[in-house]
């Protein structure tokens, strides 16, 4: 059977029903890879449980951090914050051979390859905002309307002065990494947050877009040979094709979100590319 490049994000394994979904995830062939762009869970032990299990089943597992992994949750005995917490998660992944944004980008050589698989950690900087509002005014409006991401309380940017500053540092590091790749090698970007703002345009609460990405990454789609992007965070699984590039949101999401869907939860195939993903709009 042809090996597949598969993806799922936002496993949120704190929920028992989601754990059962994870336990049922299996490759279709020995060569299948699995991309997991973040929000596996909040507790380090939960993240470890899921990644260990999946690393034993899939030929290669690739992870990028979500905002939930970066929370210092009051119930998590691991009290590390910010960069230190991220580094611990990276070390945890490495224990099971899971590829992180700190590792060399693996090359997928199956159907649709060769293509570099680039897990990213670039966070957000509040630039996904509408109109001509400043960041401060947009945040004030969000607080007034009661739409405030929990990150404001639990995602600590230490040692950076702000999440925005951490995002700027990550953009710089990531740009340098992407620039090292051969110019003719296609790349699949794997990031918790969407790399362009269009996916956030259908959010029920538009203010939430502030915590959903950065306008700085859109230029990467023009600068590099991006074959596709794979993201989560919005909990709105779908495929959009923008300027010929397929953007796959692969979230599982919370039980109350996925249980009413007509299809059973499962993995999204990124490669081999479907006819839908090859369509341009
Ligand atoms: Fe999530
Ligand atoms: Fe998220």
Image (cartoon, helix red, strand yellow):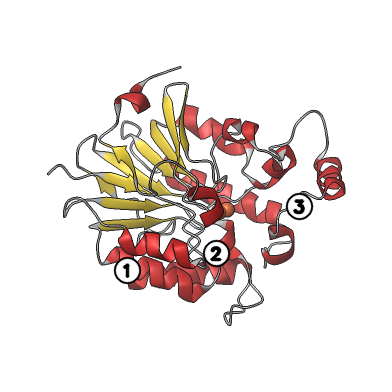
Q: Secondary structure at mark 3?
A: loop
Viewer can see residue 124: yes
The numbered dot on residue 140 is none
Mark 1 / mark 3, whichever is N-terminal: 1
Residue at numbered disc 1 = 53
Label 2 element class? helix
The residue positioned 39% from the left and 47% from the top of the image is 118
- The first of marks 1 and 2 along the sequence is 1
Residue 254 in view here: no
Viewer-proximal residue among 158 and 172? 158
Task: Single out the mark in the foreground, 1 or 2.
Answer: 1
Kindly tell me whether mark 3's CB lies below 8 Å from ligand 2: no
Q: CA distance from mark 1 to mark 2?
A: 17 Å
Residue at 20% in and 37% down: 111
In this rendering, the count of numbered labels is 3
Instruction: Give x and y (percent) for residue 143.
Output: 83, 50
**Residue wearing tag 3:** 148
In the picture shown, does residue 100 fall above or below 138? below
Of the 4 image quadrants, the one containing the N terminus is: top left
Q: Which residue is mark 2?
A: 69
């Amino acid at each position: 059977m042809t090996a597949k490049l598969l993806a799922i994000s936002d496993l949120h394994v704190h929920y028992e029903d989601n754990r059962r979904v994870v336990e049922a995830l299996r490759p279709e062939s020995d060569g299948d890879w699995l991309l997991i762009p973040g929000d596996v869970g909040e507790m380090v032990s939960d993240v470890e449980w899921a990644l260990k299990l999946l690393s034993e089943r899939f030929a290669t597992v690739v992870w990028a951090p979500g905002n939930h992994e970066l929370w210092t949750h009051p119930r998590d005995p691991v009290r590390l914050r910010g960069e230190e917490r991220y580094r611990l998660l990276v070390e945890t992944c490495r224990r099971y051979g899971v590829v992180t944004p700190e590792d060399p980008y693996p090359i997928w050589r199956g159907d649709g390859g060769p293509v570099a698989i680039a897990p990213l950690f670039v966070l957000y900087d509040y630039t996904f905002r509408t109109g001509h509002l400043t960041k401060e005014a947009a945040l004030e409006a969000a607080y007034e309307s009661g739409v405030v991401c929990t990150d404001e309380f639990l995602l600590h940017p230490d040692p950076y002065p702000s999440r925005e500053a951490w995002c700027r540092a990550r953009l710089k590091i990531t740009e340098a990494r992407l620039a090292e790749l051969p110019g003719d090698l296609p790349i699949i970007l794997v990031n918790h947050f969407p790399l362009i703002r269009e996916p956030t345009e259908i959010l029920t609460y538009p203010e939430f877009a502030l915590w959903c990405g950065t306008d700085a990454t859109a230029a990467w789609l023009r600068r590099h040979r991006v074959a596709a992007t794979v993201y989560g965070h919005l909990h709105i699984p779908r495929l959009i094709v923008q300027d010929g590039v397929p953007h796959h949101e692969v979230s599982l999401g919370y039980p109350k979100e996925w249980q009413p869907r007509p299809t059973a939860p499962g993995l999204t195939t990124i490669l081999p590319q479907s006819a839908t993903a090859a369509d341009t709009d």
